[in-house]
Amino acid sequence: MSNASALADQLAELLSRERDAMAEFLVALADFNRRRAWAELGYSSQFWFLHRRLGLSKGAAYNRKVAADLIERCPDVLAPLRDGRLCLTSVVELAKVLTRSNVAEVLPRFFHCSRREAAEVSAAIRPLERPPLRDLVSTAPAASTATPMAAIRDNSVMVHPDEPLLRVAPPTTTRTIPLTEELRRLHVTVSRRFLAELDAARDALSHSHQGATTESILEVGLDLVLARHRERRGIGARAQPSARTAAAGRLRAEVKREVWHRDGGRCQWPIEGGGICGSTLRLEYDHVVPRGRGGTSHAANIRLLCRFHNQWTARAVYGDEHMDRFTTSVPRASEPVAA
Ligand SMILES: [Zn+2]
């Protein structure tokens, strides 16, 4: 055997081991996720565990999270991942279109595809199989809190045969490209309705912001959203302690302000090995010593927690059975899709 072909054999052997190791990793990750072990270590999702604890880039973490979730729902995906017919970067596209009823037909179409080829295959399949985009239009509070949590409560069932096995957020709709140190170009996919509203806002602002650019119109809107958010959090100027707030035992605005600034607007839940969760999403004020156990509402006993960790700690204090009477959401199953 020539030296070159011996080297080629060695490379093939190494590659095969790499694929085996990756498949083993994904199986172990699916198991880790099934136990919600990441939550025990302080992380608010599988994705953040992969990114922060294992040091994977966000893209690499996301691909592995989707692959492990898909293997959990459709074990047929594992063999082609292991033998190299299916590559990890194609899995996100596959997950968009794979359903219980189309596995035999659809899975082979992704074999030996590059990421771009996989995107083309999924785009060709999706118009026929994509369910209505109801997630995007529904803003009713009752539906948005109850339905998605119920749907992910048990991730192995409740999937219609023709529904995609995984809900994959469409990350391609928003993209930023750095132009200079300060400037970014933002690509956003929007509806015609959005454009009509943008024009209406431009008209509405024509007196105060004559000739406003799209950026400045959107900035005005963002300012309003953030001002309202700060007000709700008690960190705006208008928030006042009311009799109703005091009677209900809720936190006074100055306590909220103090806690918010002290905690830097981030979830303070400690993660394994040091550091904090640090999430800025859906933050809530948490009593370190619960009120029911004599905890006060002074700033020293209040901390910021994200929704996930607030419910996690409530379950630790009061138990699952008690909490299930008050909430349908299950932190164990909470799963932000991407950063
Ligand atoms: Zn958190």
Image (cartoon, rainbow, N blue to C red):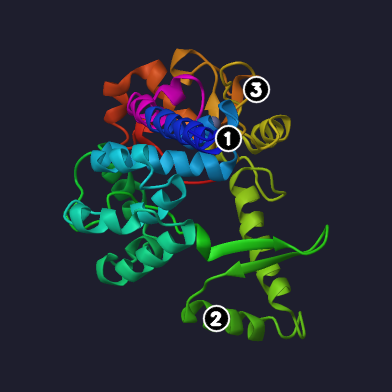
Measuring from the top left, give residue 89's x and y in whole percent.
Answer: 47, 49
Q: Which residues are magenta?
A: 25-44
101 to the left or right of 329: left
Three-letter amino acid code of the residue under disc 3: Gly
Examine the rendered structure and indicate whether residue 211 appears above or below residue 153. Answer: below
Instruction: Say what secondary structure mark 1 lies in.
Output: loop
Residue that label 3 marks: 275
Q: Residues within 10 Å of mark 2 (few under 14, many from 20)?
A: few
State the residue position of label 2: 195
Q: How many marks?
A: 3
- Residue nearest the observer in this picture, 180 or 139: 180
Main SS class of the magenta portion in the image: helix
Q: CA distance from mark 1 to mark 3?
A: 17 Å
Q: Which numbered disc, 1 or 3, marks the residue closer to the eye?
A: 1
Note whether 95 is above or below 216 in the view shown: above
Q: CA distance from mark 2 to mark 3?
A: 43 Å
Q: Earlier in the sequence, mark 1 or mark 2?
A: 1
Q: Which residue is mark 1?
A: 56
At horizontal 47% and vertical 76% (from top left) the residue drawn is: 191
Q: Which is closer to the viewer, label 1 or label 2?
A: 1
Residue 244 in sight: no
Q: Is mark 3 within 8 Å of ligand 1?
A: no
